[in-house]
Image: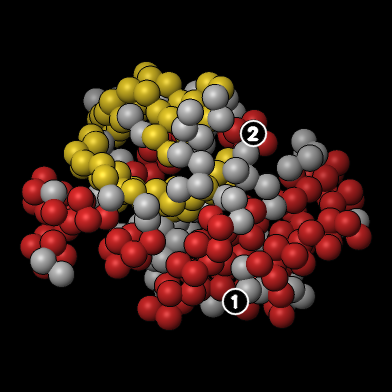
Amino acid sequence: MPLLETRGLCKQFGGLQAVKDVNLRVEAGEIVGIIGPNGAGKSTLFNTICGVYRPSSGEIWFAGRPIHGLRPNRIARLGIGRTFQASRPFQQLSLEANVLSAYGARFHGGWRAMWGRAFTPQHRERARALLELVGLAEHAQTEARHLSLGLQRRLEIARALALEPRLLMLDEPAAGISHEEGQQLMALIRKLRDKGTTVLLIEHNMQMVMNLCDRIEVLNYGVQIAAGTPGDIARHPDVIEAYLGKEVAGA
């Protein structure tokens, strides 16, 4: 039984079919990449899985239970954490407080109920452990607004991990960061997988996708056009025509 599965998933906005009949399977312990040109439906697929959008038709199953139609907070509590294309930390809060805010939200329904209860010694210890895991322990008391984009990406991952997810969904985690930061990010994602977190990611950095992912799903105009190992995808004629280009295929 896959950890995550979509069955005939569709999302339509008026006359636009953003996601059409997508059948996605993610097994526990995998790193799976979703690629495709801009406008292919990748973020719409993410948002539909996470409950931001309700599917127009089809089903979404997580850990053996249907989650289509559930609200985002309920889906998060079931074990799905995610990051977004744009980093959105609380700029005036320290990194530790940013992680504490996410950790508290896992257990409490609103800010007033959560805020006073999240700042316990146990929760602070957990927040510091997550910052250590993503390589930000030395910046724990730094305000988030002082971080570089690469470090903000790591903070976003730490906040998502505070939800204690079984599945971590990363939306373009390498966007705008340097090559060195990208290499460090790949090492972090592998570490998370080795610790038991399954990873589903959208990414345009093809070097990262090809070197990091166990399997790759390709979307074009909302439709799955290919799925397979990185080697399979690099040689797939439809993928080459729609997205990769001859240069990548021949690399």
Residue situated in front as seen by the camera: 239 or 37: 239
Rendered location of residue 47, percent (x, y): 45, 38
Question: Residue at 84% across / 56% down in the picture?
Answer: 123
Q: Which residue is mark 2?
A: 78
Quadrant in the rendering for residue 92 = bottom right
CA–CA distance in space, label 1 to label 2: 31 Å
Residue 159's tag is none
Residue where numbered disc 1 is placed: 147
Report the residue at 70% width, 63% height from top: 130
The residue type indicated by label 2 comes to: Leu
Outermost residue, top side: 57
Is 197 situated left or right of 251 in this image? Answer: right
Please determine whether, in this image, residue 3 is positioned above or below residue 54. Answer: below
Q: Nearer the viewer, mark 1 or mark 2?
A: 2
Q: Height in image: 4 above or below 96?
A: above
Bin the neighbour count of mark 1 within 10 Å (Cα to Cα): few under 14, some 14-19, many 20 and up. some
Residue 113, horizontal then vertical, whole percent: 85, 41
Circle 2 — which element? helix
Q: Amino acid at mark 1?
A: Leu
Residue visible at 45% across and 48% down?
A: 30
Residue 65: percent from the left, percent from the top? Answer: 56, 22
Image side of residue 164 versus residue 192, left or right: right
125 vs 104, nearest the viewer? 125
Q: Earlier in the sequence, mark 1 or mark 2?
A: 2
